[in-house]
């Protein structure tokens, strides 16, 4: 059924410009290359379901192409169908040496080029190169013809096999070996040149209508190319083992003087590694791997402002429209397939139908929801990222020219986030764990040094907020196709975050910037949120109601980038009333994260321009007034010691602000203030995540004597840690700090605090409840 559905999806019109961009790219690369070994080869690497195969298939309608799909014959779930004859020939190396296998490949391509050249002589000529390439593409759609073509190229190797085995048995006879290799190369090049001449002859004027000086005339691509890297395909080179991939790349170096390009397609980043030994001594110049695959190319407008409800967002038919093409191209073909969309997404993330504790699938699900990035400097982290790309739906954003690491991540794909939530909570499995799965995954990644230091506190915050959101979905259960994408009450979310005791304080909170404001409970009684995952903001443009309603339409919250204030680290969009999504009915929770006792930075939401003026076209005066007085929440998550002050000195008066601000500060990081921290084991994970990092944090001996000994080695300098005890100061200044013993940090005063309104005149009122 899966293969049939995929085949049906392929018959739909191609969407986006990815194929056109790919064609233009290979023409440009071909024009700029220096005819050296491997510079006519490009790996295409990207996660599953992103349209790699469809892109090169579409390109084959404009560029004369010889395709090969290396998928095993028994795998009937994929499309296009496998080329078992071609696959068998390439992967069965017969224990040959590198040179013997290369000659065998040269004989094969010589035969294949000759057969294709003869066949296209019988085809009708066309006015343009692209038209003739498309005619050849349509000819290959005949599966019987394609199979017979490749079958014919593998037959009749009696004389050639004798030559190959003679070389392998007399490996030391270098003159004989080199002569046979040159003869095979000469025959293959002759066959290739004949093919290229015939392509030009059948293409009218033969011109490829592109702006590049040296366009590609023949493209070969190998789908599922990672099978070429299997150890079972290794050829011998003395004591060295070379895979079929290595030898095949070396073989294509024979064509480097001609306008031939070779593409390898795979989900596995292993194909970006430089091939093994080449007979060429010229410097190896590799083409940068190609990763620019279709994303967000649904053919119709997904959502129109003021036209979609937050309940409609939670329909699977809506969620599939975002991200990679895999899911929306299959939607609507069969109702039974539609019902299995979330299970399919779950299977793709897990790379299995089974949920395994601590496996890579669980790591992938956590990354999708929490926007986890890895430390590029860690080899183990890069290896994990590669495995997640290969089998668990992580996306490759870029591969640098040096190929030492990959830039990978989890862009917003609401369907995958929904499936990931189901994986992590295992709602239907009955599994019970001492530690919440997402917390366990984060703990493991942290322990292995994979999480960048600068993101650890923010990750702790994203984790706490996500768990609270999921907990609130259980508190207010509704029937939706996508359970975790369904909207939840903002009040339920806050209660799930801090627990019922602290929630009593929050419910009674009043604005800290406007006098005589209504309580938070009254202001947000109808407000809902629906985020299932975090996405990365690039600049302060995301912090506006113009973007907020679109974030709600995608079930995402923001990890803020370089916003104008450097004060807002996370943003959760809120729909204030039960009306269609639009800019004038949204607000948000603006989060600042602190792990030191520094002074808070004002979160000037109005000054940042979050709220659009007015109330929209045809709005009534009541609607305009509601839009221009929309409330919002600021949440300061103080993970470190209690600061000297909880809220900024700057207070706003009613003359300055029109939008009520409910300012909440949560101090601490324990079950006492966060209800979603379930036990001491989880508490320890958060403590490690949010701790400041210095030389003493991970020192194994924590007693005063050893701490002093470490600081006496001067990892840093301070008047209070003994750094200057080697000098005697003037005795008249005894009051100065000097050689005082190291002090334990002040104890943390945990709690949930609310900023009250302070009039613009001096007041002795305490600003804390």
Image (tube, helix red, strand yellow):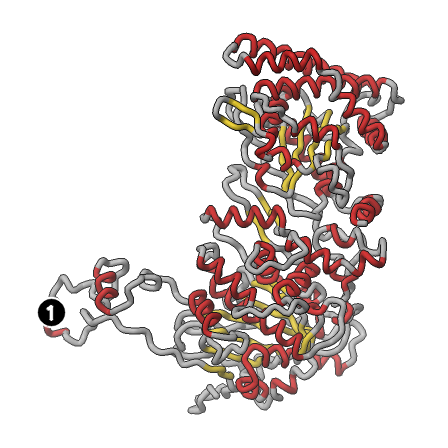
Question: Can the viewer see residue 213 in this picture?
Answer: no
What percent of the width, then of the height, locates residue 616?
75, 72
In this orientation, does residue 236 appear?
yes
Give neighbour class at mark 1: few <14, some 14-19, many 20+ (Cα, 10 Å). Answer: few
Instruction: Judge from the rendering whether residue 208 lies leftward or rightward of residue 368; answer left or right.
Output: right
Q: Position of residue 559 (x, y in %)?
A: 57, 63
Quarter of the image holding residue 711?
bottom left
Residue at (69%, 77%) from the top-left corner?
A: 576
User: Residue 155 appears in which quarter of the rendering?
Assistant: top right
**Position in image of residue 745 (x %, y %):** 32, 74
Q: Nearer the viewer, residue 235 or 394?
A: 235
| Callout 1: SS | loop
Q: Residue at x 44, y 55 (%)?
A: 449
Q: Residue at x 59, y 24 (%)?
A: 95
The answer to whether residue 28 is above or below residue 48 is above
Circle 1 residue: 730
Q: Is residue 137 above or below residue 627?
A: above
Whole-percent x, y for residue 709 in the image: 21, 62
Residue at 59%, 86% in the rendered image: 507
Residue furthest right as drawn: 124
């Amino acid at each position: 059924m899966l293969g049939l559905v995929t085949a049906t999806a392929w018959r739909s019109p191609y969407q986006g410009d990815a194929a056109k961009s790919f064609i233009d790219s290979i023409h440009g690369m071909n024009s700029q290359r220096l005819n050296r070994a491997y510079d006519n080869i490009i790996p295409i690497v990207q996660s599953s379901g992103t349209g790699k195969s469809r892109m090169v298939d579409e390109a084959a309608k404009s560029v004369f192409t010889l395709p090969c799909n290396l998928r095993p014959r028994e795998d009937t779930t994929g499309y296009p169908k496998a080329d078992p004859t071609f696959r068998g020939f390439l992967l069965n190396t017969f224990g040959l040496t590198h040179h013997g296998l290369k000659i065998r490949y040269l004989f094969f391509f010589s035969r294949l080029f000759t057969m294709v050249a003869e066949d296209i002589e019988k085809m009708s000529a066309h006015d343009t190169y692209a038209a003739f390439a498309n005619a050849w593409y349509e000819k290959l759609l005949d599966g019987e013809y394609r199979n017979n073509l490749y079958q014919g190229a593998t037959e009749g190797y009696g004389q050639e096999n004798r030559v190959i085995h003679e070389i392998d048995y007399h490996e030391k006879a270098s003159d004989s070996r080199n002569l046979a290799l040159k003869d095979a190369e000469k025959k293959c090049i002759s066959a290739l040149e004949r093919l290229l001449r015939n392509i030009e002859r059948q293409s009218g004027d033969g011109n490829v209508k592109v702006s590049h000086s040296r366009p590609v005339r023949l493209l070969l691509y190998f789908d599922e190319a990672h099978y070429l890297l299997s150890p079972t395909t290794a050829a011998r080179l003395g004591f060295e083992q070379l895979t079929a991939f290595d030898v095949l790349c070396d073989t294509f170096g024979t064509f480097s003087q001609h306008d031939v390009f070779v593409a390898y397609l795979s989900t596995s980043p292993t194909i970006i590694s430089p091939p093994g030994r080449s007979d060429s001594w010229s410097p190896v110049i590799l083409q940068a791997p190609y990763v620019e695959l279709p994303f967000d190319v649904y053919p119709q407008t997904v959502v129109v402002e003021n036209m979609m409800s937050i309940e409609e967002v939670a329909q699977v038919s809506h969620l599939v429209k975002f991200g990679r093409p895999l899911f929306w191209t299959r939607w609507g073909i069969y109702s039974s397939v539609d019902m299995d969309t979330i299970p399919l997404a779950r299977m793709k993330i897990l790379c299995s139908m089974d949920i395994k504790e601590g496996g890579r699938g669980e790591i992938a699900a956590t990354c999708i929801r929490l926007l986890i990035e890895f430390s590029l400097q860690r080899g183990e982290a890069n290896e994990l990222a590669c495995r997640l790309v290969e089998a668990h739906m992580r996306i490759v954003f870029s591969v640098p020219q040096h190929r030492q690491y990959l830039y990978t991540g989890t862009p917003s794909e609401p369907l995958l986030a929904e499936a990931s939530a189901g994986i992590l909570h295992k709602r239907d499995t009955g599994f019970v764990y001492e530690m919440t799965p997402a917390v366990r995954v984060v703990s493991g990644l942290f322990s292995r040094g994979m999480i960048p230091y600068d993101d650890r506190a923010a990750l702790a915050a994203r984790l706490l907020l996500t768990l609270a959101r999921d907990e609130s979905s259980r508190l207010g259960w509704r029937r939706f196709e996508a359970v975790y994408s369904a909207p939840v009450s903002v009040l339920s979310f806050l209660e799930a975050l801090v627990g019922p005791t602290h929630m009593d304080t929050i419910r009674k909170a009043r604005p800290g910037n406007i006098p005589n404001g209504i309580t938070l409970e009254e202001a947000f009684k109808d407000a809902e949120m629906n985020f299932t995952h975090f996405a990365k903001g690039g600049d302060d443009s995301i912090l506006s109601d113009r973007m907020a309603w679109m974030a709600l339409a995608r079930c995402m919250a923001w990890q803020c980038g370089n916003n104008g204030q450097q004060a807002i680290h996370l943003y959760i969009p809120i729909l204030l009333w039960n009306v269609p999504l639009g800019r004038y009915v949204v607000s948000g929770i603006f989060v600042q994260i602190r792990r030191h006792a520094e002074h808070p930075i004002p979160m000037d939401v109005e000054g940042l321009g979050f709220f659009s003026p007015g109330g929209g076209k045809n709005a009534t005066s009541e609607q305009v007034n509601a839009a221009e007085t929309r409330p919002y929440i600021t949440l300061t998550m103080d993970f470190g010691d209690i600061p000297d002050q909880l809220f900024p000195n700057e207070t706003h008066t009613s003359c300055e602000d029109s939008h009520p601000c409910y300012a909440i500060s949560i101090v601490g990081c324990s079950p006492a203030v966060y209800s979603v921290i379930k036990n001491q084991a989880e508490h320890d994970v958060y403590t490690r995540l949010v701790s400041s990092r210095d030389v003493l944090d991970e020192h194994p001996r924590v007693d005063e004597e050893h701490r002093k000994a470490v600081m006496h080695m001067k990892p840093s300098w301070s008047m209070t840690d003994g750094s200057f005890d080697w000098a005697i100061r003037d005795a008249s200044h005894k009051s100065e700090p000097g050689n005082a013993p190291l002090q334990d940090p002040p104890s943390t005063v945990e709690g949930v605090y609310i900023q009250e309104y302070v009039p613009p005149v001096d007041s002795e009122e305490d600003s804390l409840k």
